[in-house]
């Protein structure tokens, strides 16, 4: 069902500073940048082979990422896995005992379809299913 890692998401307080650090320290360039209003985040995707490092920062107080940042600080937020069919992957994970954050797939950045799985049902890791 999983085809590859789509991205590893890292929450940062200052997106521009994080982008500059990744550029200067690792030579990484921004492949895509977008504000996702419905999730209250701005993201910068840094290409690493066929996958991405996704730097995310909250755009409004009270968003899930803002709450995460306030509680845990900067750092690893979730892992996104590419799947050929997000709805089928979500259904299979729920049948296997996973706890969904999203009851049904929804639009994501880059015109993808996504669904999140709660860390309580996936060994402590927030998982994002990503269908391109």
Image (spheres, rainbow, N blue to C red):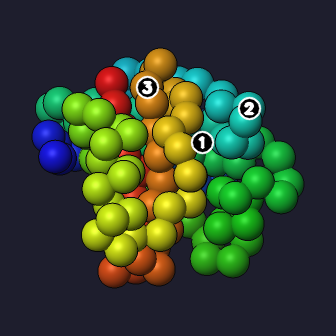
Residue identifier under label 1: 15
Asked which quadrant contains residue 126, the reply is bottom left
* Residue at image mark 3: 112
Q: Nearer the viewer, residue 98 or 62?
A: 98
Residue positioned 83% across, 58% down in the render? 62
* Residue lying farthest to the front in this orientation: 95
Residue at image x 17%, y 47%? 2
Determine crowd level at label 1: few under 14, some 14-19, many 20+ residues with C-alpha closer than 10 A. some
Per the rendering, the mark at residue 62 is none
91 with respect to 40 (left or right)? left
Query: Which one is earlier in the sequence, the residue at label 3 or at label 2?
Result: 2
Q: Is residue 24 visible?
A: no
**Looking at the image, is mark 2 or mark 1 nearer the viewer?**
2
Image-quadrant location for residue 94: bottom left
Query: Which label belongs to residue 37?
Result: 2
Disc 3 versus disc 1: nearer the observer = 3
Q: Mark 3 and mark 2: span between their CA atoms?
A: 15 Å
Disc 2 secondary structure class: helix
Query: Residue 19 location, x and y as percent?
Result: 48, 38
- For marks 3 and 1, give the CA distance: 22 Å
- Mark 3–mark 1 CB contact (< 8 Å): no
Q: Within the image, what quadrant is residue 51 found in?
A: top left
Q: Earlier in the sequence, mark 3 or mark 1?
A: 1
Residue at screen point 29% across, 34% down: 85
Coordinates of residue 111 in the picture (x, y in percent): 47, 19
Give the label, 3 or 2, closer to the camera. 3
Residue plotted at (25% across, 39% down): 83
Is tag 2's residue or tag 1's residue first in the polypeptide sequence? 1
């Amino acid at each position: 069902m999983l085809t590859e890692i789509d991205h590893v998401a890292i929450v940062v307080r200052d997106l521009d500073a994080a982008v500059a650090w990744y550029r200067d320290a690792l030579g990484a360039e921004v492949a895509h940048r977008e504000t996702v209003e419905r999730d209250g985040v701005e993201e910068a995707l840094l290409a690493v082979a066929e996958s991405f490092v996704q730097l995310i920062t909250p755009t409004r107080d009270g968003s899930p990422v803002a709450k995460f940042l306030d509680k845990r600080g900067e750092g690893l937020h979730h892992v996104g896995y590419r799947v050929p069919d997000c709805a089928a992957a979500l259904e299979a994970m729920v049948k296997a005992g996973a706890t969904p954050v999203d009851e049904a797939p929804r639009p994501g950045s880059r015109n993808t379809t996504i669904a999140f799985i709660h860390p309580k049902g996936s060994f402590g890791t927030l998982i994002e299913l990503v269908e391109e």
